[in-house]
Every structure is written in structure tokens, then in C-alpha cells.
Image (spheres, rainbow, N blue to C red):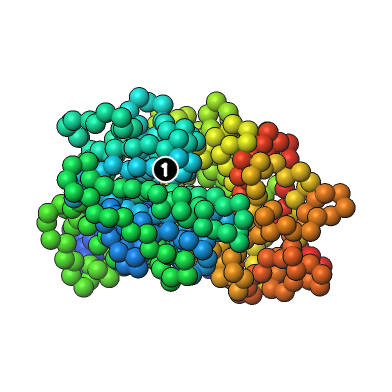
Amino acid sequence: MNTKESESIRHQAKIAALPFVEDRATADAAQTLRDELLYHRATQTYLWALPLLNTLGMKVGSEKAFGAGYHVLPVWKKRLDARTLVTTPNSDVIYAMSYVDLGKDGPLVFEAPPMLQGILLDFWQRPIPVDGGKHAGDVGFFGPDKGKGGKFVLLPPGYDGEVPQGHFVCRSGTNNVFVFLRAFYADAGNLQPPVDLIEKTKIYPLKGEARPMTFPDASGVPANMLPSSDASAFDQLKMLVDAEGPHLADPDWMGMLAGLGIVKGEPFEPDERTRGILDRAAKSAYKMSRVIAFDELVSGRSFRVYPDRRWLNPMADATAENPSGKLDLSWRRVDRGGALDVDCRPWFFSNYYSVSPGMLSQIPGKGAFYAIAFTDADGAPLTGATNYQLNLPKDVPAANFWSVTLYEAENASGLANGQPFPSLGSRDQPVQNADGSTDLVLGPKAPPGQEKNWLATVPGKGYFAILRLYGPTEAALAKTWKPGDFTRMK
């Protein structure tokens, strides 16, 4: 038994042995147990609400930096670098993200230009279903517009009003909606075409006068869009409960929120003692989520993409017939009667955000393929002071492009490594080996002559990596092409 385990067990034993006199808790014991109950209730509520807190972190941080409203659509016009703190962004596409409130503004129309790629999600980050049952969330090639563009009408929960003709009808599970858009560039030296494409987007009320769209340039602007990890998380949940009401969650979990004092329309004013407990609970739960987030085996499922490699993906058991494997996109287990997977969901929303059927497509040459590395070939966590080599065999199976991006182990934002972007990929034209394979090198300093294949790391900072293949071809989907593991260089 190590020291940390013994400390934990001693604490549990102390709680279990609190004195009762004549079968009743003493005053001190009763207060300790009430505090412990509040702490555990808050900790579990934080973990349960992590998809909401992930979205709220982005919304609060974005609106603080760029403004609020359905008409405000921040665009990272010069790509997204490490100054934007948000979980696992992709530096190799142009991003735009916005947050709208159907409860406040009523039904909204999202008008997409042709060739725009995006996802419309509720605040649980569930893809919003489109009437007809064939599509959910996707805008673009995998959406009902099939890349031709079109008008999507976003309807709040329980909406039974008139539905306009000629619109794709999206019925959201929450009043608040997350709009996540991406555009691809052919030339890193000319980002204007994808920016122009995104700026053709329109969002406006189904009824009433529309405000003119604004597209703030978010590139280079310091913005903290990470989930809150202190007592303010519960303040954010209170704002969301007020905006949503009982359709936010089932009655049991609304009861858990109420047990913390979070009730629609009622004051949430915890005293100093209670706020201190909530603060410690949020900090503890956030750290618990960071532990879950680095596991290879979660809820009895191995996340390994390849049996003989360390690369992971929560949909590692996906098939062409079932692209999300044993999970649906509400993080419920199809092999357990639809039960919520209470570890797989925080695993994902600790480090990532947004998923849709299109992202998980198993159609060769379409969609995307993701593989995540937390450790080296020996299972040791990736560390900034160590030099590694990563071999990508020849003919990387990506119809569009591939990239490797590094992220902070602390919070999953882009690794601030001193380079313009913490990524390196095919469009950077790294030097290939004689056999057609590519060796990337990672470490604090570039080995002489290998600067073009180098990703910088930072001593004292742990990190992890994501390999992305855009337009994965058959060799990727069939897993016959396999990237090497991170190996220590001598």
C-alpha cells in the first residue's frame, strides 16, 4: 500500500468511524457527515455535468473575449494557436464557434453556404436530430444539405409551432445550442478563401428583424475557453438551469442539482462554508476527470486502436455498420440497455469536444480518423524533456491531409511550445525517408538537420498527441496501416 492509498483509506475509515451516541451522531460527527455528503454530491454532479461544463467553458470564455449574441461568430482567421485555451483544437483548419439561446431569441435559422462543414449540437454536445431521422448535427457533405448549403431551422425543446417550408428542421434538446464550424485551406499562405466561406454564414431569428452578422478575428487573442475547475462551475450550471428548466436533465439529476441549491428561478447564494466545499469538490472532480481521461481501459473496454500499439480512440471498436462502436452519441451503452457510461463520457469531455455521425464516417476518403497517444512504446507518459521519434509508414492513408498535434497534459489545450502552431503534417512537407516513410522528431531541441520534421516540447510539461487523417482511405479504416509508437531517442 503506497502513501496516497493509505491516506485515502485513512480518510474513509475516519468517516466510517465517526462517533454515534445512543444511536445518534454527535453534533461534530453530524456536521462532518453533512459536509462529506455535500462534497460527494457536488463531485459526482460535476463529473455528470462535464459535457455541459465543457460547452459552458467555451461559451463563457468566448463571450468574454468576443461578445455574445446569435449574430456573433468568432473566426480564427489565422488559425488557432496556443493562446486560445480550449480542449484539443485543430491548428490545421479554420475554426468558428458560436453559442445561441433559443429560449431567449426563439427559433433561429442557420443559413449555410455551399461546402461549409459544421456541427449543430445542443449543450450536452449531442448532435441535433433533423426531421426525417436520417441526419443529426452535421452540416455539409454528411448533412442533409449534402454540401450544397441550405437553411437549417433550430427549434427549442417542445416546440409545436409552425415549421417553415424549405428548411432542414433541427429539434434541439436544449434551448442553448453550440454552433461549431470548420473550413479547410489548400495553402497555409492564403487563408482568405476558407475565412470568406465561413463569413457567408448567416444566423437570424425565424421571425422578427435580424441583427447583422459580425465575425471577430479570434486568432492571437488570449481567451480561456476551458471548463471551469472551481466553484464557478456551479454558478454556470445555475445560469444554465435558469435558461433551460426541467428539460435539461431527468428528474433524478435535477434533484441532485437541487441538493446543491441549484433550482430554476430560486436564488443560489451558498454561504462561505458551502462555497468552500463546492470549490474543493470542483477542483477534486476536475482532477478525477483528468485521471479518467488518460486511461486505456475504460468501463471494461480497451480504447486501443491497434492491439500492438499505444494509440487510443473511444470508438476503437467501431465498424462500418456501427461507426460509434458500443456507444451512441449521447454516451450511452448499446450493449447495456442504453445505460449512461459514467466513465466514457468524462473520458471524452475532459480532453475533447463535439462529435457527429459525419466525423465518425467509415466511408473511404471522407470524414476523419483520430488516434491519440498518451504514452511512449513502453507505456511511460510523454514528457517534455525527452526526445522521441515517431515513424509514419509510407503512403499515409489520408485523401486530404494528415497532421500530428501536441496538447498540454494539464488541460488538453494546445502545447505552448514556442512554435507558431503545435502541429506538423503533410502540408508542411516534412522530409521523407528513402522507403517513403516519415520520421517526426519531438523534443526540446531539433536534432541537427531535422528541423523540418521537428515538433518542439517543453521540459517540465507533460503532453499528449493526436494523429489526424482527413479523408481516411481504406488502409486507415481497416487498420492495415499502423503508425509507430513514440520511441525514445538515444
Residue positioned 70% across, 69% down in the render: 443
Q: Nearer the viewer, residue 352 or 342?
A: 352
Where's residue 123, x and y in %? Answer: 33, 48
Image-quadrant location for residue 478: top right
Residue positioned 33% across, 43% down in the render: 110
Apparent side of residue 238 relative to residue 416 in the rendered image (left or right): left
Q: Nearer the viewer, residue 228 or 231?
A: 228
Where's residue 189, x and y in %? Answer: 61, 61
Whether 345 is drawn above or below 68: the answer is above
Any part of residue 184 in sight: yes
Where's residue 61, x and y in %? Answer: 35, 64
> What is the count of numbered marks?
1
Would you call the spot at circle 1 few (<14 residues within 10 Å), some (14-19), or many (20 or more)? Answer: many
Mark 1: amino acid: Pro
Residue positioned 35% across, 24% down in the render: 132
Apparent side of residue 127 relative to residue 476 in the rendered image (left or right): left
Residue at the spot of label 1: 113
Element type at mark 1: loop
Whether 281 is drawn above or below 485: the answer is below
Image-quadrant location for residue 382: bottom right
Q: Quadrant of the C terminus?
A: bottom right
Whether 170 is drawn above or below 70: the answer is above
Where's residue 409, x and y in %? Answer: 55, 63
Considering every residue shown, the one lying at the far right of the view is: 434
